[in-house]
Image (cartoon, grey):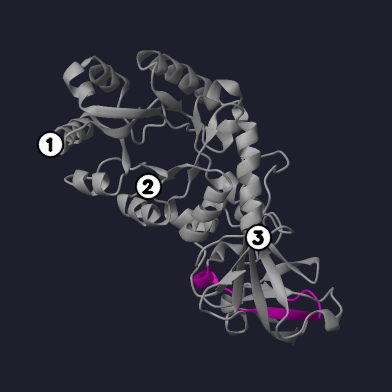
Amino acid sequence: MMTNAIPTDLAGAVLSIDLAALQDNYRALSKKAGKATCGAAVKGNAYGLGLEPVARALWDAGCRDYFVARPKEGEDLRTLLPQAVIYVLDGLFPGQAEFYARNDLRPALISLEEAREWAAFGRRYGRALPCAIHVDTGINRLGLTLPEFDVLVNDADLRSGLGIALLMSHLACADDPPHALNRVQMKRFAALRKMLPEVAASLANSSGIFLGKDYVNDLCRPGIALYGGNPTPGKKNPMKAVATLEGAVLQVRDVKKGESVGYSATWKAPRDSRIAILGAGYKDGVPRHLSSRQKDGPAQVVVAGKRCPIVGRVSMDMMGVDVTALPKAKVTRGTRAEILGPRLPIDEAAGWAGTISYELLTRLGSRYARLYSGTANPGES
């Protein structure tokens, strides 16, 4: 097991990351992808869980293709995995082609301007450098338009300067299988493939892998599913929980009926109650929107194996939990409460907070102890 420099007994909250579960998720997604290769999105510090241990664990599980957002993330990853194939999803930053080439990074080119800059640099460099071509098929974020792609394909001089290794697009509604845009994008992408039949193709993200064989193509790019998020909303989560966030009890208070807890007195005890104050708050990535509310019932944490409601406002460093239903001996100073984890799925907590699992993971704080377990060769944290 690895840990960061903060001992668990000096941290109000502890984040445990199960790298074996991460590897199991990767293998399960690879199996689901069938004949397609399964890569991994490790942008945003591996969705907040730590680029170095996560990337090494994925490599040990057989992953060879990685996707980051920014070129600096690519440089960081290159130092960890010298032999990996690394794509930069945000494209080619202006004037930075030499940086990409020096670190063997493949920009996912999103415009003709970028394609021309990359081709021109490649000619000066002495060879056509590898890249991806990202075409927008309906999400209207990044990517060449369909007419721009047609220009690129038919410009022999431009094509000759590009080492096109991957054709890609991104699904807008993969987590909503019946949505009509899924098939629209799939059909548009299939037509694009015919224009570059010799190039590997990638369309499916985490949820896209579960849409069927028409979506997986040659290379899949799972992200959130690797880290335990549910790629099939509304159905049982096929992935294992990877991250467990726990807050330690700082104090247990007796609160009389009618007394309030926390800022602005937003919650009043409906009966004489015992309230555990946890050392975890929004500085630690616990959303303030998990504060107690009437609509849809209260958000919860797990204490001594039982779900207990959050009461009062989540503040910067702490939060209140109603533990009245638990025996007093079960909740004492130092007892840990599960805020996210196997017994409290990240998607459920995200729903209470009015957000998504992606945001919850990537906003996890930095001052708690991080514990890594479950892999024989995790490297250094």
Residue 356 visible in the shown view:
no
Residue type (three-letter) at the residue carrying disc 2: Ala
| Disc 3 target residue | 374
| Disc 1 target residue | 124
Q: Report if the CB atoms under discs 3 and 1 are less than 8 Å apart.
A: no
- Residue 305 vs 220, above or below: the answer is below
- Upstream in the sequence, badge 3 or badge 2? 2
Q: What is the distance, in whole Å, between disc 1 and disc 2 at their CAs? A: 26 Å
Residue type (three-letter) at the residue carrying disc 1: Arg
Residue name at image x 38 percent, y 18 percent = 198
Residue name at image x 49 percent, y 53 percent = 55
- Residue 39 vs 257, above or below: the answer is above
**In magenta stretch: residue 2:** no
- Residue 299 vs 159, above or below: the answer is below
Residue name at image x 21 percent, y 43 percent = 97
Displayed quadrant of residue 293: bottom right
Q: What is the distance, in whole Å, between disc 3 and disc 1 at their CAs? A: 46 Å
